[in-house]
Amino acid sequence: MGSFVASSSLTYCVAVLIFAVFCDGGTTSPFVRKIWPSVAMPFDSDVFALPLGYNAPQQVHITQGDHVGKAVIVSWVTPDEPGSNKVHYWSEKDHKKKKYSEDTVVTSYKYYNYTSGYIHHCTIKDLEPDTKYHYVVGSGHVRRQFWFVTPPEVGPDVPYTFGLIGDLGQTHDSNVTLTHYEQNPYNPKAVLYVGDLSYADDHPLHNSLRWDSWGRFVERSVAYQHWIWVSGNHEIDYCPEIGEYTPFKPYLHRYEVPYRESNSTSPLWYSIKRASAYIIVLSSYSAYAIYTPQYQWLKEELPKVNRSETPWLIVLMHTPMYNSYNYHYMEGESMRVVFEPWFVEHKVDVVIAGHVHAYERTERISNIAYNITNGLATPVRDPNAPVYITIGDGGNLEGIANNMTEPQPDYSAYREASFGHAIFDIKNRTHAYYAWNRNDDGTAAEADSLWFHNRYWYPDEEGENGNSRKRTINKMDQNCLIFQSWCP
């Protein structure tokens, strides 16, 4: 990308945000959310509508299909019979050259008294970067057409905007979250989804029809944008009481990811490159202690990251390592003990998690000095450490988490018991703009925001004393943004 190319959101930032300030550190939001029942939308809701026609493809979704973004996995379900297993696709640049995919797997599964439809996973390869493609699934009178845009070529100063969503479920709040995301003025290009999808297991006998309804609910976004998947506890679906002993059975049948491309042995942990970001997905509910496959994989994976190629190192997981709510308090502690030293050593920029049904952002802190006998068990400011974001506030069936630990820990920069979503808007190798939107506000209103400085290329502290206390954007920051170039 040229040094003078700027996104529309960047133009807005330069014009307006030169005079912006960061929110106070250590803030518990005074906002009081209106509470109404968290109930699943009924099956006859319009957001769950079946496509017309016998055996019409439904639950269409896409994700990245290789390590670098030149392939896409297209998935869909046909309810009555396998039907066509091909994807018909073409580039908007050359619509005359239409192609048919060949690499399709069709599967199905049984869960208690439920039998799934026919689940198709098709990998389309050798795609051009930063190109709009149209694609068709189905055949005859039940053909359905969608489109997607491939990510730009991987590179250090490639701007790219991610959406961040977690614990969405399928309630009325979920619908508000998804609608706000779709209307976000930063126009995010892909979603980093940090686990807990359908909440089918919260229904009697793990009602698997809720997997189908959720797939139809999110199709309006995920059929057009790549969603990068992370597994959560509601994907485990382990239920011996009804004879279901295989963890993650529905999730793994329905959601294919390119885990082999990063030499992972499991689809529950893997990595991808996308634009200027290197994204590592971890599994909070798979073994991660020393000698386990996930441990060995991450130990070998982190040194592979070339920050001259992908400056932004992002880690996704479901259970937060730092959490000042009384819900799921310290559930991520054992994984923190194992992996946090590596995150600091390799200067991870941000760790994004869900699980707690509220919002929180930390300062850059670590707690890696503790060794049982020295008593050093308090998190400390650490410029090499990530910011930890908890965004399990999608709007799920279990409701909001509104019981916080008091007083607010020093490491907690901002927390609020509301539903919402966020964006992570990478400008270049040095700067990214982050903003969280609560559902109760207008779609363009930001309740919390922060300019991120890349830990490798620009390890200057984001605010005074390393926190997010108020300060105007300095001259160096302005130049980095205006010219879309890296700064020394």
Image (cartoon, rainbow, N blue to C red):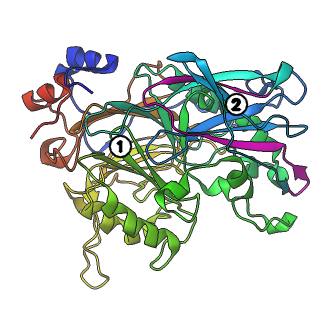
Query: Where does the image place residue 453, in percent across and percent down from the top left?
Result: 21, 41
Residue kind at label 1, given as amino acid type: Ala
The residue lying furthest to the bottom in this view is 373
Of mark 1 and mark 2, the one earlier in the sequence is: 2
Quick check: is 128 in the magenta stretch?
yes
Q: Which residues are magenta?
A: 111-138
Query: Where does the image place residue 280, in percent across and percent down from the top left?
Result: 43, 53
- What secondary structure is found at the residue carrying circle 1? strand
* Left or right side of 109 for 415: left
Residue kind at label 2, given as amino acid type: Phe
* Left or right side of 200 for 287: left
Residues at marks 1 and 2, CA–CA distance in whole angstroms: 28 Å
| Mark identifier at residue 378 | none
The crowd level at tag 2 (other Cα within 10 Å; few <14, some 14-19, many 20+) is: many
* Left or right side of 470 for 423: right
Where is mark 1, residue-wise? 277
Quick check: is 421 in the magenta stretch?
no
Up/down of 418 relative to 338, above or below: above
- What secondary structure is found at the residue carrying circle 2? helix
> Which quarter of the image is occupied by the C terminus?
top left
Query: Where does the image place residue 144, in percent across and percent down from the top left?
Result: 74, 22
| Mark identifier at residue 217 | 2
**Where on the picture, by quarter, is residue 154?**
top left
Up/down of 483 relative to 452, above or below: above
Closer-to-camera residue (276/24): 276
